[in-house]
Amino acid sequence: MQDALDGAVPLLVVGFSPADALAPLGEYLGLAGPVLSDPERVLYHRLGLRRAPVWRVYSPGTLARYGLLKLRGATLHKPVEDTRQMGGDALVVDGRVERLWRPATPDDRARPARIAAIARDRRGPAAP
């Protein structure tokens, strides 16, 4: 973990996929922090995160996009993950959840830069 005074905010990503699937995803996304697997979704449930209704995930716009991709010759694969998981983001300080973002839709996620800015504000100015 990086020094708390260097301006960086440590990042921890928790997913419910098997660890062997999450490691390549973390590399692909360029995540600098640890990527942990929680297949039982213990943390997910403790944070009160939820699943989206089917109509919200597979909206008419989403279905139209899939149809257009298919018309253009794209191969659509059956999802291997739970596409209805909404996910969420949390700012944790000293093991305590200081701020929790629960998205209204699967795409309504907190921007990482915003979470980092709030974390830096709460930590206060770095020592010279």
Image: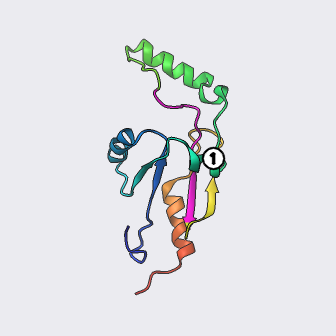
Which residue does the image show at 53% across and 59% down from the upper left?
114
Q: Is residue 88 visible?
A: no
Q: Which residue is mark 1?
A: 45
Residue 23 in the figure: left or right of residue 111: left
> What is the quadrant of the N terminus in the image?
bottom left
Q: Quadrant of the C terminus?
A: bottom left
- The colour scheme is rainbow
Q: Position of residue 64 (x, y in %)?
A: 55, 19
* Number of marks: 1
Main SS category, magenta section? loop
Q: Secondary structure at mark 1?
A: helix
Amino acid type shown at disc 1 = His
Q: Is residue 24 visible?
A: yes
Q: Is residue 70 above or below residue 119?
A: above
Membership of 55 in magenta stretch: no
Magenta span includes 89: yes
Q: Residue at coordinates 51% horizontally, 71% vertically from top-left?
A: 120
User: Closer to the camera, 71 or 110?
Assistant: 110
Does residue 74 appear left or right of residue 114 in this picture? left
Q: Position of residue 97 (x, y in %)?
A: 61, 62
Q: Which residues are magenta?
A: 80-92
Q: Name which residue lies at 38% across and 17% down.
A: 75
- Picture quadrant of residue 118: bottom right
Residue shown at the point (37%, 14%) measured from the top left: 73
Local crowd size for mark 1, using a 10 Å CA cut-off: few (<14), some (14–19), many (≥20): few
Q: Tell me residue 113's x, y (percent).
A: 49, 59
Residue that protrudes farthest toward the bottom in the picture: 128
- Residue 38 in the image: x percent, y percent? 49, 46
Task: Looking at the picture, tell me which residue is in the foreground, 101 or 95.
Answer: 95
Task: Reply above or below: 68 against 121.
Answer: above
